[in-house]
Amino acid sequence: MNSLKSFSCSTLLTVFMACGGNNSPESLFEIELPNNQNSFAQNESIAIGIKNKKEKNLGEITYSIDGKELPMSEGTISLDIPHLGNKILKAKVIYDDSSAEISKNIKVLAPKAPEIYTYEIINEYPHDAQAYTQGLEFHNDTLYESTGKTGRSSLRKVDFVTGKVLQQIDLDKTYFGEGITILNDKVYMLTWKSGTGFVYNLKDFKKMDSFQYGKSKEGWGLANDGKKLFKSDGTEKIWFLNSDTLVEEDYIETVTNASINDNANELEYVDGKIYANVYQKSGVMIIDAKSGAMEGVVNFGGLIDKVDHHDSWSEKDNVLNGIAYHPERKTFFVTGKEWNKLFEVTIQKKK
């Protein structure tokens, strides 16, 4: 009897499916894009349509990305969206007496290729060759630096002209220090894989608080625009953190006109742009802080030849890392992990 019941149910289910019982949105409709393309440029107008698999009576169709409706005109939509990167294009389809929502994964990339920048060295200053630099930032003409490596991580206040460490606290030996930023007389500092950040009083370096990461699993670089914090985590994402709650509220993805890029490391914010060291590379990306579009690349490849290579030097570890903008001098300061020099430079487009 049980076998008969099982057979009957299976048979009925098969008949039900064959007769159109599967009315999932994906079985009814599909978003159609030109040549099955999935990569487009910001603000590009693209032809779009709906494949009506079951010949339903279609009504209104609306398209959206990140909750923003994309108006359709003559069978095309414009990818006029503020944040670039990996996106979910959604279509809400009204049909018969019902509605369905379907989606397609696409990439929305920068509208043009990044420009190439170069640099001019203005000054060279001494830098602690034992400092595994992770974060670098100016505040009131004073340089603040965070260093990494488990058991060697620290937060420092530095006289950038002499390289002398004016003030320092060491992290617990269990932490690997990462990037810093300064806002409202507080120093915010990340750790690498511990999922924890710290908040210090700028004046005396006393620890005021700690915070946990959200969806970002690692801590790399930090910067701020005077209101919110920007946090890199080794992926294509740069997170926006509420400076009061330190909650990750949003993010951008770093993109060029050809691809989505990851490995943004140490960060610096200047006039709407994020300057980001590329991990284990000699380049710095110039990223639009609103869209994520990489607008420029600075090649600092020549600097490493001006640095003394000590016995334990590693081409993999002792890379360019650390970029700070001095607003009064209107110059950038760059160094690397365990470099014995700090370079003051200007940045300009390559002719």
Image (cartoon, helix red, strand yellow):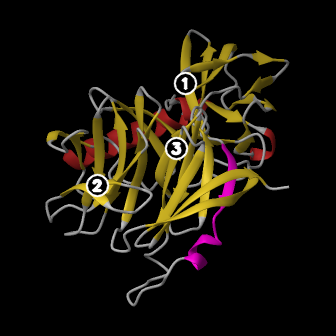
The residue wearing badge 2 is: 156
The residue wearing badge 1 is: 101
Of badges 1 and 3, nearer the viewer stands 3
Q: CA distance from mark 3 to mark 2?
A: 17 Å
The residue wearing badge 3 is: 326
Q: CA distance from mark 1 to mark 3?
A: 50 Å
User: Residue 85 appears at what percent x and percent y?
Assistant: 60, 42
Instruction: Name the N-terminal-most of marks 3 and 2.
Output: 2
Outermost front residue: 162
User: Residue 175 appears at what percent x and percent y?
Assistant: 20, 61
Of badges 1 and 2, nearer the viewer stands 2
Secondary structure type for disc 1: strand
- Quadrant where the N terminus sits is top left
Residue drawn where x is 47% and y is 43% of the image: 238
Q: Is residue 77 left or right of residue 207?
A: right
Instruction: Name the N-terminal-most of marks 1 and 3.
Output: 1
Q: Is residue 254 left or right of residue 170?
A: right
